[in-house]
Image: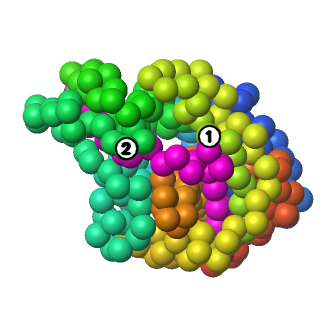
Amino acid sequence: MGAARVAVVTSKGGADADADLPLLLAALRDAGLSAHAVAWDADRPQWDGFDLAVIRSTWDYADRLPEFLAWADATAEVTRLRNPAPLVRWNSDKRYLLELARDAVPVVPTRFLEPGGSLDAAALDGPHGVVVKPAVSSGARDTARYEPGRGADAGRHARMLLDQGRTAMVQPYLPLVAEGERALVFFGGTFSHAIRKQPLLTEAGLIDNFRVPHPGAAPYEPSGAELRTARAALAAVPAPGDLLFARVDLALDEAREPVVMELELIEPNLFLRINPQGLERFAEAVAAALAAGR
């Protein structure tokens, strides 16, 4: 028998921008696997020729969500897909935050505004301002924060999204995000490493889809409370045992308690270049998933 074949799934634009991709391919090959980068929308790829397809830099999925979800379902019919297609679908819409909250996971309080519903611009305000974003997005696209007293501006942002047929979400701005956002990375349900990065929404009232992602990302040692919150979030995921990788993004609320900002199960940056041990752990998790036949 030859080496197990692993597709590291990227996109036509993501392959060049993914700094971790060559590192990950090399690590998998060093582990004795036959690893190949394949764009999810490539012309006629033979997905059934792979023993495992691992989603990585499919960074255009949010702009082509129905097509991407159909690809995930079809690919899962012919090979093992990780993370699995049902979890990809669940995580693709940030209304999953409501489910986490119902399971008593501390999350940033979030209101969702649906197309066709009423919009009270006066309610789109808070003591520290608010953040408005689409429920389906990646990389902080079409996202902005608004300072206190700028509820009308926040309302116009939300109305723009609603008029496009998109669900909008509104969250209070957390001032302690100035101390950095935390991203905790897990492989096979086990904590691997974490980073802390500078805040992204530095200029109020600005929708900037060309921001540099993850500014100032650096290794970080999470607190016990941050680890507990991240693990609680993962435990609330449907079929958590099927997670090959996960990233839990946290910030501190006004009581300095960690709250979940986002749970990233589709194509998160895992900061493998910053954490070489994380790269080894990811390769080990892929090999373990293959060995377990799951």
- The quadrant in which residue 250 appears is bottom right
93 in relation to 118, above or below:
below
Could you tell me if the residues under marks 2 and 1 are in contact, i.e. CB atoms within 8 Å? no
Q: Quadrant of the N terminus?
A: bottom right
Determine whether, in the image, residue 126 is placed left or right of residue 247. Answer: left
182 in relation to 12, above or below:
below
- The quadrant in which residue 292 appears is bottom right
78 in relation to 56, above or below:
below
Q: Residue at the location (15% across, 34% down)?
A: 120
Amino acid type, mark 2: Pro
Amino acid type, mark 1: Pro
Q: Which residue in the structure is indicated by mark 2?
A: 127
Q: Residue at the location (62% across, 50% down)?
A: 181
Numbered disc 2: secondary structure: loop
- The quadrant in which residue 20 appears is top right
Q: Nearer the viewer, mark 2 or mark 1?
A: 2
Q: Is residue 79 magenta?
A: no
Q: Which residues are magenta?
A: 165-190
Numbered disc 1: secondary structure: loop
Foreground of the two, 121 or 187: 121
Determine whether, in the image, residue 83 is placed left or right of residue 39. Answer: left
Image coords of residue 287 (percent x, y) = 73, 69
Image coords of residue 236 (percent x, y) = 41, 72
Q: Residue at the location (25% across, 45% down)?
A: 112
Q: Residue at the location (49% across, 26% down)?
A: 204
Q: Which residue in the structure is indicated by mark 1?
A: 199
Determine whether, in the image, residue 38 is placed left or right of residue 272. Answer: left
